[in-house]
Image (spheres, rainbow, N blue to C red):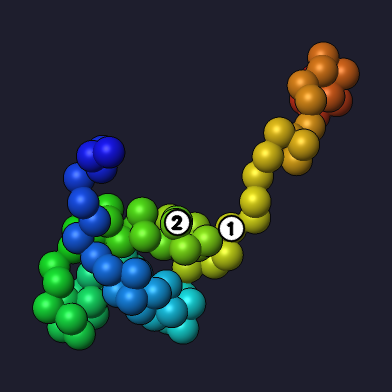
Amino acid sequence: MPVQGCPWVTTPQEDRYLTLTARHNQTMPARQLSSELAATSGVRVSRQTVYRRLRAGGLCQTTSSVCPAHSSTHKEPFTVESATSTLDLG
């Protein structure tokens, strides 16, 4: 069966390097992480690829903090009472 989509540019080891580097340097932007990977392994990836790899590794896209798992059970159901209770109509 043929594989669908484009092949990944990075290997699992390079993805792990990105994840570990992002965890150690939590304020490092994705462009800097991309430059670090290029200097280490010679593989040039885009900022968006770094975002995707961090997301796949369990990190948020905009920061290097760990994202909570979201599911339909975590979301509060919308009701008229909940919407009006948060509004300040006074």
Q: Are marks 2 and 1 in contact (CB under 8 Å)?
A: yes
Tell me what residue is drawn at x 24 percent, y 65 percent. 10
Q: Which residue is mark 2?
A: 55
Nearer to me, 62 or 51:
51
Name the image quarter holding the C terminus.
top right
Tell me what residue is drawn at x 83 percent, y 24 percent. 82
Tell me what residue is drawn at x 12 percent, y 78 percent. 42
Nearer to me, 4 or 66:
4
The quarter of the picture where residue 40 lies is bottom left
Answer few, some or many: residues within 10 Å of disc 2's Cα (few below 14, many 20 plus, some between 14 and 19): some
Asked if 60 appears above or below 15 in the picture, the reply is above
The amino acid type found where label 1 is placed reads: Cys
The quarter of the picture where residue 3 lies is top left
Tell me what residue is drawn at x 18 percent, y 81 percent. 41
Left or right, 10 with respect to 59, comes to left
Where is residue 18 shown, x and y percent of the image? 35, 73
Point out the residue furthest to the front here: 1
Name the image quarter holding the N terminus.
top left
**Mark 2 and mark 1: Cα distance apart in space:** 8 Å
Point out the residue furthest to the top here: 80
Nearer to me, 33 or 71:
71
Asked if 28 appears above or below 79 in the picture, the reply is below
Q: Which residue is mark 1?
A: 67
Asked if 41 appears above or below 85 in the picture, the reply is below
As helix, strand or loop, the secondary structure at mark 2 comes to: helix
The quarter of the picture where residue 53 lies is bottom left
